[in-house]
């Protein structure tokens, strides 16, 4: 095969690959945008706001703000919960802490079993309802966080696709440049015959 033809074919294939990478990158970016918008809109409808900064002044175990919340929850003091990362912090470092301080560690299945065993116990019924609400909200917030992680992965995947497409287009440009500089009669995959013989062209 002539070297010029090979360079042109390889470069044309590179263009196809680059186009595929660009499309994949665009789709990944669309997925990132869609996921982020959906998470933001769904969280905004919940109208959840972190406790104000003043609430973190005197943290105490057993109260609304415990010492364990200072490193994580306090950074969002007074803010509305709108992002996946905020949802994770609120679920794991705020709701989960309060659930763990409840009887039966706030585990809904345990509280529900106790309430069924004592159907006339009003306090257990109230505890069951509180546990159910807290556990459900925590689960929904962690689901929003999970989707936001998928969105972040899509974002970096899109960036990787665009970078790979740029590299491929650079190689395509070099391929066309090399083809332009290559003589028409130059061949590739030339097999040489033994010394003194005539080389075979393959």
Image (cartoon, rainbow, N blue to C red):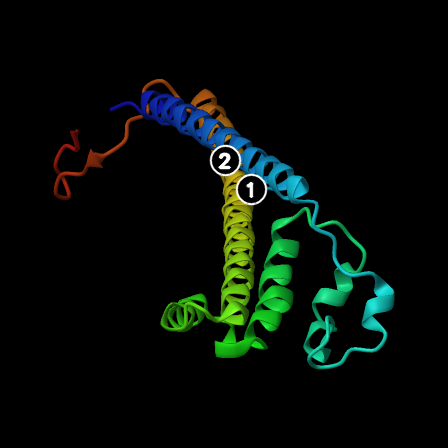
Q: Quadrant of the N terminus?
A: top left
Residue 197 as seen in the image, left or right of residue 25: left
Name the spot of residue 62 as percent of width and height, x first: 69, 79
- Does 64 appear above or below 150? below
Residue 28: mark: 2
The disc, 1 or 2, on the residue closer to the chain's N-terminal end is 2
Frontmost residue, 27 versus 168:
27
Q: Are marks 1 and 2 in contact (CB under 8 Å)?
A: yes
Residue for point 63% across, 62% down: 89
Name the spot of residue 174 as percent of width and height, x first: 49, 30
* Quarter of the view holding residue 88: bottom right
* Quarter of the view holding residue 200: top left
The furthest residue to the front: 120
- Does 19 appear above or below 88? above
Mark 2 nearby-residue class (10 Å; few <14, some 14–19, many ≥20): many
Residue at the spot of label 1: 155
* Quarter of the view holding residue 137: bottom right
- Does 194 appear above or below 176? below
């Amino acid at each position: 095969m002539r070297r010029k033809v090979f360079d042109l074919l390889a470069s044309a294939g590179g263009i196809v690959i680059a186009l595929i990478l660009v499309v994949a990158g665009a789709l990944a970016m669309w997925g990132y945008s869609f996921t982020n918008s959906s998470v933001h809109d769904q969280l905004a409808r919940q109208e959840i706001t972190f406790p104000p900064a003043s609430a973190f002044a005197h943290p105490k175990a057993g109260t609304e703000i415990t010492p364990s919340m200072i490193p994580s929850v306090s950074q969002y003091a007074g803010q509305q919960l709108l992002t996946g990362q905020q949802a994770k912090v609120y679920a794991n470092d705020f709701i989960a802490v309060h659930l763990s301080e409840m009887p039966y560690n706030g585990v809904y299945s345990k509280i529900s079993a106790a309430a069924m065993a004592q159907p006339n116990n009003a306090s257990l019924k109230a505890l069951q309802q509180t546990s159910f609400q807290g556990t459900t909200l925590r689960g929904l917030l962690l689901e929003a966080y999970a989707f936001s992680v998928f969105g972040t992965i899509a974002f970096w995947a899109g960036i990787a696709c665009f970078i790979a497409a740029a590299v491929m287009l650079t190689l395509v440009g070099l391929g066309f440049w090399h083809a332009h500089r290559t003589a028409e009669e130059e061949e590739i995959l030339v097999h040489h015959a033994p010394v003194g013989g005539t080389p075979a062209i393959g």
